[in-house]
Amino acid sequence: MKDKKPLILVTNDDGISAPGIRTLISVMETIGEVIVVAPDKPQSAMGHAITINNTLYLDKISKENDSITQYSCSGTPVDCVKLAVNEILKRKPDLCVSGINHGSNSSINVIYSGTMSAAVEAGIEGIPAIGFSLSDYNWNADFEPVKSFVKKIVLETLEKKLPLGVILNVNFPKLKENEIKGIKICRQAKAMWQEKFDKRQTPFGKDYYWLSGEFVNQDKGDDTDEWALENGYVSVVPVQFDLTAHHTIQQLNTWNLNE
């Protein structure tokens, strides 16, 4: 039926009680039928980790008369998507949305992001997927200004469709709605973390470390996600899980590897 609502899987990495995912759920409710499977605790920077050496628990936290079915999972964001697809959903969802993350996942951060890894896992399953992040790490961040942009991007994705294997990485600047200039389709900026470890000792003399670092943008282009965010735009970067460096295959074929 043409008027059948799309089935939307919602997940995140900040945990099922995080304000970001509650905002995302509220927007998705206006678009389709929503199923939530999210970690029972924060799982930030988990990347594409999966649980293989421990048991996984899945608890239904919604009641029979609730409008949305919700599950909390003891595992990682990727575990959440795997369990949703294989154990909960009776059919493949029309879309998976992950977030809204508390903090940016632009540039190289996409590699470490649990938010984006959940979306990538959905892409591997053949499900159109979007990861949403806000450049504000505060637990009480204001997500209200981005709601209209989330809805617009989701509706366009459902209507226009994504190429198979392509996932959208969407980042929002920390601005009021009337200060956001628009949406930019971007490439991932070339940037990195200059990291260091703060070495300390326990009262018993055992060394331990705290990871810290500074984010360094090495990219001066005006077509990147970092440029967009710095200049008041929402950045949208199409990403893929095929990590093959296709442009290098021809060069490697000139090596004398079989002699």
Image (cartoon, rainbow, N blue to C red):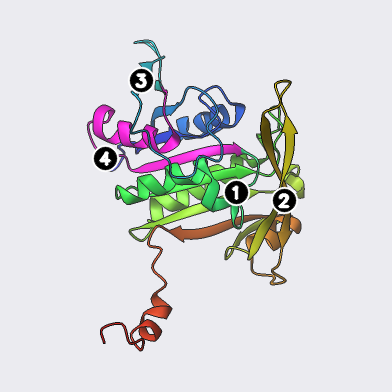
Q: Based on the picture, tell me whether residue 78 belongs to the magenta stretch.
A: yes
Per the model, the C-alpha gap separating discs 4 and 3 is 22 Å
Q: Earlier in the sequence, mark 4 or mark 1?
A: 4
Q: Say which of 23 and 191 sits in front.
A: 191
> Where residue 250 sits in the image (x, y, percent)?
36, 85
Does 136 sit left or right of 34 as displayed? Answer: right
Q: Which of marks 1 and 2 is nearer the N terminus?
A: 1
Per the model, the C-alpha gap separating discs 1 and 2 is 18 Å
**Which mark, by number, is residue 105?**
1
Q: In this view, does 182 lie above or below 186?
A: above
Foreground disc of the pair 4, 3: 3
Per the model, the C-alpha gap separating discs 4 and 1 is 26 Å
Q: Based on the picture, tell me whether residue 105 belongs to the magenta stretch.
A: no
Foreground disc of the pair 3, 1: 3
- Disc 4 is placed on an element classified as loop
| Magenta-drawn segment | 73-101
Residue 8 seen in the current view? no
- Disc 1 is placed on an element classified as loop
> Where residue 74 sits in the image (x, y, percent)?
42, 23
**Which mark, by number, is residue 180?**
2
- For label 1, count other residues whose C-alpha is less than 10 Å away and answer few (under 14), some (14-19) or many (20+): many
Name which quarter of the figure residue 56 lies in. Answer: top left
- For label 2, count other residues whose C-alpha is less than 10 Å away and answer few (under 14), some (14-19) or many (20+): some
Name the residue: 37% across, 33% down.
51
Q: Is residue 220 above or below residue 131?
A: below
Q: Is residue 47 above or below residue 85?
A: below
**Which mark, by number, is residue 92?**
4
Name which quarter of the figure residue 86 lies in. Answer: top left
**Residue beneath label 3, please?**
57
Proximity of marks 1 and 2: CB atoms separated by less than 8 Å: no
Per the model, the C-alpha gap separating discs 3 and 1 is 27 Å
